[in-house]
Amino acid sequence: MIRLDNRGVGTGDERRGPCSISQMADDAAELLGVLAIPQVHVLGWSMGGMIAMELAIRYPSKVTGLVVASAIPEADAWMKAKQSFNQKLAALPIEVDALRELIARMNMSWMFAAGFFDNEGRADTILALMKAGDFPLDVYRWQSQALQNHNATAGLGSVKSRSLVIVGKEDILTPLRYSRAIVAALPRSELLIIDGCGHALLFEKTEQFGAAVLDFLAQVDTEGSPASPGQ
């Protein structure tokens, strides 16, 4: 398994500055080249799902199976308005730790289904982890801008990989309509809706999510990849 830090986050601090979803997909392809790995299954959640779609569009021969979770095919007016709010929020002239907590609490309310908060201890643990994360606020704004400008719909029809699109039934951050639009545009895709969870479905329904992904990728391995070499 390969996990990478996007530019400006964690150890991926060398390429700081505004960027696009396409550029982050290029970063992932570059990493595969450095590692001399010709093909992979790709799983992306939230913004990672948008990067995964761009990787499959731009480098079809590198992607055998594609899993997209809690993502959007493009930013519509509603999503653009939300991202504009996020950028203004992250630029507020208040103390950094207080701003981090404000953003963490806001994101939690968007990311988890209502039932998640019935377990107060679990919610407190997740909030503490989100507040402790070393996530620069300028990168938060840049990634929000990338989401605001994201539009992969036109390219999805060219994706050759079999694809699984997963969404939480109670997702209010990237509602079900976005996943339906992705499936409508992806030629060889299927949709899985998981009950009782929201945007953070891989944390709320970890076992169900993992089992679905592993089963799908096993099917892809059995079929073989339709991607052609040379890109």
Image (cartoon, rainbow, N blue to C red):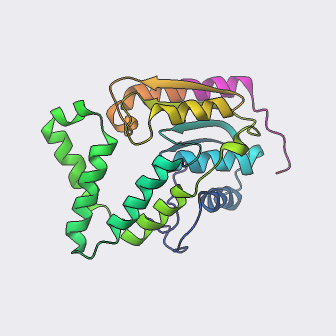
In the rendered image, which quarter is residue 66 located in? top right
Q: Quadrant of the N terminus?
A: top right
Q: Which of these two is toward me, 187 or 177?
A: 177
Which residue is depicted at the point 32% across and 65% down? 89
Which residue is depicted at the point 57% across and 36% down? 67
User: Looking at the picture, how far across and down is residue 127, in whole percent?
Assistant: 22, 51
- Residue at the outermost front position: 77
Does residue 191 appear in the picture of this structure? yes
Which residue is depicted at the point 36% across and 67% down? 88
- Residue at the outermost left position: 120
- Residue 226 belongs to the span the image colors magenta: yes
User: Looking at the picture, how far across and down is residue 62, in whole percent?
Assistant: 73, 46
- Residue 61 belongs to the span the image colors magenta: no
User: Looking at the picture, how far across and down is residue 28, in whole percent?
Assistant: 62, 57
Q: Left or right of 120: which side holds 78?
A: right
Please give the count of numbered marks on the rendered protein: 0
Which residue is depicted at the point 37% across and 38% down? 172
203 up-or-down from 33: above or below? above
Q: Left or right of 229: which side holds 59?
A: left
166 up-or-down from 219: above or below? below
Task: Write down the region rendered in magenta.
Answer: 215-230
Q: Which of these two is toward me, 92 or 203?
A: 92
Q: Left or right of 174: which side holds 102?
A: left
99 up-or-down from 49: above or below? below
User: Looking at the picture, how far across and down is residue 121, in whole percent?
Assistant: 14, 41
2 up-or-down from 144: above or below? above
In the rendered image, which quarter is residue 42 located in? top right
Does residue 38 appear in the picture of this structure? no
In the rendered image, which quarter is residue 190 located in? top right
